[in-house]
Amino acid sequence: MDFDTVVLLIQSKVSNACHPNVGLVNICKRLMNLFWRIKLQHIYRERNDVTNGLATWSHNLDLGYYYFEESPAWLGCLLLNDSLGAVKARLISSS
């Protein structure tokens, strides 16, 4: 899902019990309460290739949780781009 949506769900004081990822959101909230300061910040997908790649890939999966014992081979170049700080251009509306 879009990270803007994730931020809204996690920062919401009201639990959205109907959302399909409510369990994961609640786990995130509990983990965040263990730390002194947490800041959620939107990062454009062009600056976070790994997350964008995994999110795009997940659209073909059934709803649920997926764990990797090792990184998928196709993720290697995306990990390299992120670790090097590779930047891509993006047009953003000024409104």
Image (cartoon, helix red, strand yellow):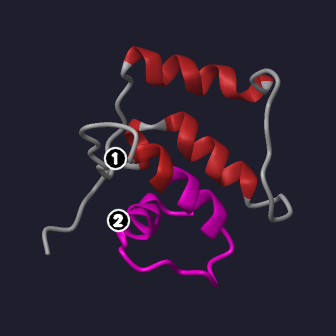
- Residue in view at x 49 percent, y 22 percent: 81
Marks 1 and 2 sit apart, C-alpha to C-alpha, by 16 Å
Dot placed on the residue nearer the N-terminal end, 1 or 2: 2
Q: How many marks?
A: 2
Left or right: 86 as drawn, with respect to 60: left
Please name the amino acid that badge 1 sits on.
Ile
Percent position of residue 15, x then y: 49, 77
Query: Which label belongs to residue 54?
Result: none
In magenta stretch: residue 88: no
Left or right: 1 as drawn, with respect to 31: right
Query: 76 or 13, which is in the foreground?
Result: 13
* Placement of the C terminus among the 4 image quadrants: bottom left
Q: Give the foreground label among 1 and 2.
A: 2
Q: On the image, which quarter does residue 8 sit in? A: bottom left
Left or right: 25 as drawn, with respect to 36: right
From the image, tell me which residue sits under label 1. 43
Dot 2: few (<14), some (14–19), or many (≥20) neighbours within 10 Å?
A: few
Dot 1: few (<14), some (14–19), or many (≥20) neighbours within 10 Å?
A: few
Please name the amino acid that badge 2 sits on.
Gln
Q: On the image, which quarter does residue 92 sit in? A: bottom left
Q: Residue furthest bottom?
A: 18
Where 49 sits versus 12, above or below?
above
Q: Which contiguous range is marked in magenta?
A: 1-28
In magenta stretch: residue 6: yes
Query: 38 or 53, which is in the foreground?
Result: 38
Percent position of residue 76, x then y: 67, 20
- Residue in view at x 32 percent, y 42 percent: 89
- Residue in view at x 41 percent, y 46 percent: 32
From the image, tell me which residue sits under label 2. 11
Callout 2 secondary element: helix
Percent position of residue 36, x then y: 26, 37
